[in-house]
Image (cartoon, rainbow, N blue to C red):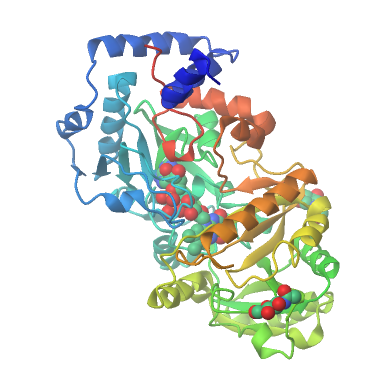
Amino acid sequence: MGSPLSSFLRQNKPLFFRIFFILFFSCIPDTANLCSNLSLATTAVQTHSASSDNHFSLKKLTLDGHFSFENIHYAAKDFGNTYHFHPSAVLYPKSISDISSTIKHIFNIGTASQLTVAARGHGHSLQGQAQAHQGVVINMPSLQKPVMKVHTGELPYVDVSGGELWINILHETLKHGLAPKSWTDYLHLTVGGTLSNAGISGQAFLHGPQINNVYQLEVVTGKGDVLTCSEQQNADLFHGVLGGLGQFGIITRARISLEPAPKMVRWIRVLYSEFSIFTKDQEHLISSESSFDYIEGFVIINRTGLLNNWRSSFNPRDPLQASKFNSDGKVLYCLEMAKHFNPDEAGIMDKKTESLLSKLSFIPSTLFQSDVSYVDFLDRVHVSEIKLREKGLWEVPHPWLNLLIPKSKISDFAQQVFGEILKDNSNGPVLIYPVNKSKWNRKTSFVTPDEDIFYLVAFLSSALPSSRGTDGLEHINNQNQRILDVSTRANLGIKQYLPHYSTQKEWQAHFGPQWKLFVQRKYAYDPLAILAPGQRIFQKAIPFL
Ligand SMILES: Cc1cc2nc3c(=O)[nH]c(=O)nc-3n(C[C@H](O)[C@H](O)[C@H](O)COP(=O)(O)OP(=O)(O)OC[C@H]3O[C@@H](n4cnc5c(N)ncnc54)[C@H](O)[C@@H]3O)c2cc1C
Ligand SMILES: *[C@@H]1O[C@H](CO)[C@@H](O)[C@H](O)[C@H]1NC(C)=O
Ligand SMILES: *[C@@H]1O[C@H](CO)[C@@H](O)[C@H](O)[C@H]1NC(C)=O
């Protein structure tokens, strides 16, 4: 501990990691030209040494939009509400060239500057992923270009800006009787934000996640280049950016595939007390021909409260309150399904859903269903958001944990976690539903477990900041850690969704065999590690001085 090296490391921790970044890269085969870049960067240091005035140099850029250096504290906040890294500036872009010239400028200063760049969608990240410590945050919703444009025809699509909210896309496409195919449970998220992760909801078993339903992207890379990419054009960048955690470029435009939109949805919930029967039915439904259009599920452990039903407290009625079932101490499982229809086909839909339900083994008295408009169904979480905001329960810490668990291990997991580590779910809903990976594009950066069928299990907890009890942040964090620990110990082969790690070794394990490609892409598209520093996968390279 007393060695000169360790005291050097203690005093120069950030520097050490920067060196590590460089050493790490130089060990990777096929990245020989990294060295030439690094020496370029070193030259940049010699010709441009000062760093404190970096953000003043931003002011000199000619832009259509503008920078703000004040009132930027919101950019150090996100939905998770536990990480707060303050930027030095926020860019409000009005054009793609605003984004490109900002990044070019920072790239050209090279490693003499520590400036990094984070695109911020709607800031619904959980652990600072859209933040940039003393860097530049780009407020993506200000980029209102291109204007949303729907293309009808055999393969309809919509071109949208990267900062567009999914709820706005829904309303615009519905004017043409169309809508995107794959969603998230909550629509006040941006296109760039969900495509950087995956975008998973109850339609993913059928259409794949949102990253599977994109025809083309326009991306500004970490060098400031503006590139159009698709399966046919710059395919490596296209695949890299999808699920790429913002590491390779900023999505400025996306071309999203559409389908004819239904007017109505039959929304159904049923309960199970046996986990194995519940999952058997879920797995049966996701592999059936002409099944439901949406399949999810959730766990109910020893109570229901507002937070427990927040996703859809308005409709259908909470099966637990409505039925004679009391979950006190017991674990119940709710299967949630939806079938699209238009009013003139209500009869056909009735028959179809009846036939699908007749093959399931839920507790008969727990069937609840109601018909709602497609918009109300898709925007269901927003209703809960409004209620929670009124009670001051929206802007609280959200220590969420999202896991992808292989089918063969899901019952092990359930046995060890539900009712054991997790004694009740009064802190928020616990979602659980399977998807079939063979429908998904495997070339993207998105990491899944090895098996074809895996479950998304989402612990969507809200914490009360001042509490030291079971609803406090510390308790919930400990619980999450225990869940991760048993999964690791039992070798369940899980992957985190919306992943969060603190060391590069953990990232390497997360990506597994895909790590090498991930690093190669980083090197190709963002060699100075300027982009999305809040993911904490790479650190901006600074030469060894
Ligand atoms: C209530 C709620 C419900 C949710 N439900 C679901 C769900 O059902 N399914 C699901 O999959 N996810 C869900 N999410 C998670 C959601 O996908 C993430 O929060 C995601 O980060 C999107 O949020 P955002 O648009 O605000 O992006 P941000 O948090 O702003 O950004 C996320 C990451 O992407 C980067 N980024 C943002 N914009 C761009 C861009 N244009 N180009 C490149 N990188 C960019 C950021 O730098 C950051 O690293 C939910 C979140 C909330 C709060
Ligand atoms: C998953 O999807 C593939 C391709 O559609 C199919 O062949 C396979 O049977 C499905 N697996 C299950 C368990 O449904
Ligand atoms: C269920 O919750 C109540 C309080 O809400 C608690 O008193 C009881 O011990 C819990 N039961 C179990 C089995 O955890």
Q: Relative to 172, does residue 58 appear above or below in the rendering?
A: above
**477, 174: nearer the viewer:** 477
**Picture quadrant where residue 507 is located:** top right
Does residue 379 appear in the picture of this structure?
yes
Quarter of the image for the C terminus: give it. top left
Residue 118 in percent (x, y) is at 37, 40
Residue 331 in percent (x, y) is at 76, 73
Q: How many marks?
A: 0
Residue 64 lies left or right of residue 239; in this view the side is: left
Q: Relative to 92, does residue 416 appear above or below in the rendering?
A: below
Residue 33 in percent (x, y) is at 48, 10
- Identify the residue shown where x is 69% and y is 68%: 297
Residue 213 in percent (x, y) is at 56, 50
Q: Relative to 265, does residue 20 appear above or below in the rendering?
A: above
**Picture quadrant where residue 250 is located:** top left
Quarter of the image for the N terminus: give it. top right
